[in-house]
Image (spheres, helix red, strand yellow):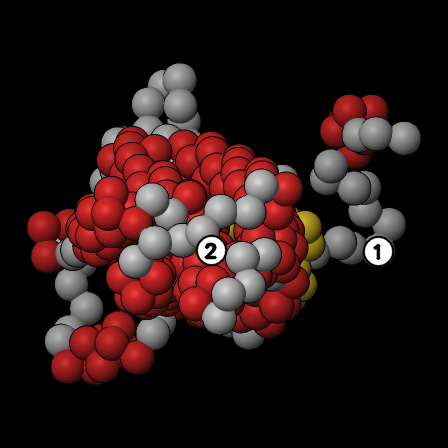
Amino acid sequence: MSDRHTHQQGQEPHEHGHAHTSPGLRHRLAHLITPHSHETADKLDPALESSARGMRALWVSLAVLGGTALAQAAVVAVSGSVALLGDTVHNAADALTAIPLGIAFVLGRRAATRRFTYGYGRAEDLAGLAIVLTIAASAAFAAWVAVGRLLDPRPVEQVPAVAVAALLGFVGNEWVARYRIRVGREIGSAALVADGLHARTDGFTSLAVLLGAAGAALGWQRADPIVGLAITAAIVLVLRDAAREVFRRVLDAVDPALVDRAEQTVRAVPGVRGVGELRLRWIGHRLRAELAVVVDGEATVREAHAIAVEAEHALLHAVPRLTAALVHADPAPVSGGTDPHLALAHHLPA
């Protein structure tokens, strides 16, 4: 006997389903204050809400970094600072990374189709790859500028203005980095976190310009390129972290603690005698679960289905950002009985 139950993305939930997101503090308070509603019109789609937060983070950071780049460009025009020019290019590029990520968030809102049965959430992972490549290009450009200045030292004009512009670039990038990373982690977007780390690399570049300007003010022209090379090394470290997070997401990696939480949650559901194969995967910034539960072999189809529904319901409450689950009910084995999956044995890898 088996039972399958799921809430597909982009489709109406079954009458006994619940479209829940992570049980954070706000959700729990709302859950206590307001009763459960089973009407689809009374529910706020958590996927749309998280995408809207991601878009808002992109627009705010685009405005901040765009303004920062414009202010720095004005100083570049009067100072002729090559280092500040490079920093300005970094900030402009960082602002423009909002475009592929914004497109990914918009695509992620589209409902699943007969061709894209899981929806378009993976576009976010592709945007994350683009951001990682942008960070790599930024590191290469920073190294190239630093080496060029080291081989051909040049005096910096209007040093105080360059220092102020560099400080502005560092503050703007660090604020945007913290904002993007915080929102990205809250909605489960690896791409937005990577974009925040990219902003942080540009902040390091601005700091290098500031330290280089201080060295130039003291008459040490090689200060700027030497510090620039040190910051390039820091950018490479940030690149490593961003690439690891994005590539793990592309390969369907999840935090093992989430798997443990899901398994413990399902084991506590009345009627569940055991948990078989359990898988979690990210689709954009949303999680999906697939699992098998063991139920009484004498249970009716309706009883097994009710247990599967309760297992899914418990998972939706316990696992952050889980939006869908596929639960398969297996009968408990009996002494001398045949394996109900025996017909599938020849399809399994040796």
User: Mark 2 or mark 1: which is in front?
Assistant: 2
Q: Is residue 170 left or right of residue 246?
A: left
Residue 36 in percent (x, y) is at: 19, 68
Q: Tell me the kind of residue under disc 1.
A: Ser
* Residue 335 disc label: 1
Q: Which residue is drawn at 65% across and 62% down?
A: 256
Q: Residue furthest left?
A: 41
At mark 1, the secondary structure is loop
Residue 331 in percent (x, y) is at: 65, 51
Taking depth in this image into account, of 91 and 347 the one nearest to the observer is 91
Q: Which residue is drawn at 36% across and 19% down?
A: 114
Label 1 Cα crowd, 10 Å radius (few <14 / some 14-19 / many 20+): few
Name which quarter of the figure residue 104 lies in.
top left
Q: In this view, does 18 lie to the left or right of 322?
A: left
Regarding residue 142, the answer to whether it shows in the image is no
At mark 2, the secondary structure is helix
Residue 316 in percent (x, y) is at: 40, 61
Q: Which residue lies furthest to the right in this view?
A: 350
Residue 97 in percent (x, y) is at: 35, 39
Taking depth in this image into account, of 103 and 107 the one nearest to the observer is 103
Label 2 Cα crowd, 10 Å radius (few <14 / some 14-19 / many 20+): many
* Residue 205 disc label: 2
Quadrant position of the C terminus in the picture: top right
102 vs 84: above or below: above
